[in-house]
Image (cartoon, rainbow, N blue to C red):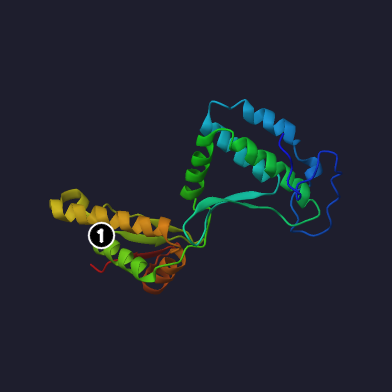
Amino acid sequence: MSALPFHVATDDEPIPALGPRPWDGPDMQAVVPIEQMLEWLRALNDDDVGYVTLWRNLVTSTGCSVLVSYERDGEQGLRVVIPCDAQIRHRSRWMHFLLEDLDRVESRRDVLTKQLLRERLKWDERPTDPAAVTLAIRDFLRTGGRILLTPDGQLEIGGEVPQAMLSGAPAELDACRRATRAYLDVRTRLNSDRQIKRAVRMLGSRTANGWIVLEASR
């Protein structure tokens, strides 16, 4: 195992007791030892998806979480969130070796990143572009798209397939595809969800089951 950073507990460092605070993480004294975790993971050396699935479950068991992070200049990485409690040095120890093992095979980080982005688990510090987001929303709705806001505040697209996709002329079909790609792109590339949710709440129609639907006027 590699040399440890200063903030990581050593293997002979006692795990302190947790305090009474309700927001502390799970007790590391009861978490599976890191050596056992690594043994389980190495049994999946030839299965990147299975490896990443188990890896994420093990990270969760330590009370930690991982997000895709974007710096203001667009640089992408992983951000580890660790509960700040009496056992933070030991949580950092488990995460140090879990991250080190993840990166033993280059393709695993790519699998993990794609999963996290699909689940919109990211920390995004890139500048927003309100005008580009507004344009993407407008064009997506104009070509038959619908933006849905679930009762628990999640954005989705859905509803009937736009008519242009079913029977439109080639130019209409192309415009529909481009508008959909542009809308999905601003959600991925720009920190746009807050602006989109605000537009849906202001301009959309609320359904009986608590969803809000934003679509072009018919």
* Number of on-image labels: 1
Q: Give the x, y percent position of residue 178.
A: 26, 55
The residue under the point 68% across, 44% down is 95
The residue under the point 47% across, 62% down is 126
Which residue is farthest bottom?
202
Q: Where is residue 195, by image quadrant?
A: bottom left
The residue under the point 69% across, 53% down is 82
Q: Mark 1 points at which residue?
A: 144
Q: Give the x, y percent position of residue 184.
A: 36, 55
For label 1, count other residues whose C-alpha is less than 10 Å away and answer few (under 14), some (14-19) or many (20+). Answer: many
Report the front residue among 194 and 5.
5
Report the front residue among 6 and 205.
6
Left or right: 196 as drawn, with respect to 69:
left
Position of the N terminus, as image quadrant, is top right
Residue type at the position of mark 1: Gly
Q: Is residue 80 above or below residue 139?
A: above
Report the front residue among 111 and 11.
11
Left or right: 59 as drawn, with respect to 7:
left
Q: Where is residue 51, by image quadrant?
A: top right
Left or right: 70 as drawn, with respect to 162:
right
Q: Give the x, y percent position of residue 5.
A: 73, 46
Position of the C terminus, as image quadrant, is bottom left
The residue under the point 36% across, 73% down is 203
Left or right: 142 as drawn, with respect to 10:
left
Q: Give the x, y percent position of residue 25.
A: 74, 52
Report the front residue among 188 and 154.
188
Is label 1 in a helix, a strand or a loop?
loop
Which residue is farthest left?
169
Which residue is farthest front?
3
